[in-house]
Amino acid sequence: MSVKPAMKYIALGVLAYGAFLVATFPAEQALNLMRDQLKGVYLQNVSGTVWRGRVARLQIGDQAFEHVGWSVSPLSLVGGALGLDVTFDGAGRSGEGEVRLGADGSIGLRDFHGKVAMMDIDQLLGIAPVKLGGLLQLELENLDALGKSLKAADGVVRWQEAEVKAPMAMELGNFVVTLKSTDAGVEGVVKDEGGPLQVDGVVKLSQEGHYRFTGHIAVRDKQNRMLLQGVRALGTMGADGRVAVEFEGQL
């Protein structure tokens, strides 16, 4: 055997051994080595390897995830990103799907299904002192974000058992938002699925985090005086009982 082919085999052997070491390296030891880069991130009961592991609780700032499991997607590394098949369940939220972490700090989701309490989301909308309740169900084909900038999103988001908790308690019903990516950002078609509040509109979210909703809102049960009063406060009610609404803000 000539020297050059032999060197190729040696190089492949070294790469294979290196991959084996990475795949079997304990996750807890790896996270300890990265502690300075993980400021604001707290983990409890880490087990498994870098390639496939679990953590009982993951705290990122004021957001907590429990029973988190991951496994590395080898093909994602070819594209220069770290792809992880992730599951979590606990602390009022659950999810499963592929999470992609880019070298530029971007985060992507692929074939992601999850549930999260609306109370965890309303702080991002900047509509205080209004407090929202209910459950968000996520069925996302893909989502790409960088910081607070949402670059793309396609899929369906359902707001189940929607309600206003403050400044006064009101049940709203169920709603669905169908998302699609556009050149300008993300567009969502909003519809109700029955219940006290009738909603029909479109929300547009720019890549810079600015959102704008335009549509119509109406109350199905005219005997629901509290909800009727709340809708009337949004604008002038037409002959068909609907109120044209438009609001915007920054995430």
Image: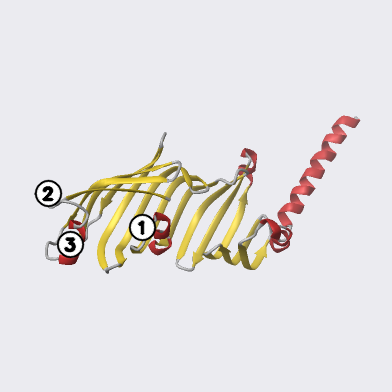
Label 2: few (<14), some (14–19) or many (≥20) C-alpha neighbours in 10 Å: few
Which amino acid, by three-letter code, is at mark 2?
Gly
Q: CA distance from mark 1 to mark 2?
A: 25 Å
**Viewport quadrant of the N terminus:** top right
Residue 1 in sight from this viewpoint = no
Q: Position of residue 162 (x, y in %)?
A: 30, 62
- Are the residues at dot 1 and dot 2 in contact (C-beta closer than 8 Å)? no
**Of pointers 3 and 2, the one earlier in the residue sequence:** 3
Residue of label 1: 127
**Which element type, helix, strand or loop, lies under badge 2?**
loop
In the depicted structure, whether residue 117 falls above or below residue 113: below
Which amino acid, by three-letter code, is at mark 1?
Ile
Which amino acid, by three-letter code, is at mark 3?
Gln
Report which quarter residue 7 is drawn in: top right
Q: Is residue 192 left or right of residue 97?
A: left
Q: Nearer the viewer, residue 140 or 145?
A: 145
Residue at figure coordinates x 60%, y 43% from the top left: 104
Q: Which mark is residue 226?
A: none
Label 3: few (<14), some (14–19) or many (≥20) C-alpha neighbours in 10 Å: few
Residue farthest along the left direction in this orientation: 239
Residue of label 2: 238
Q: Which mark is residue 229?
A: 3
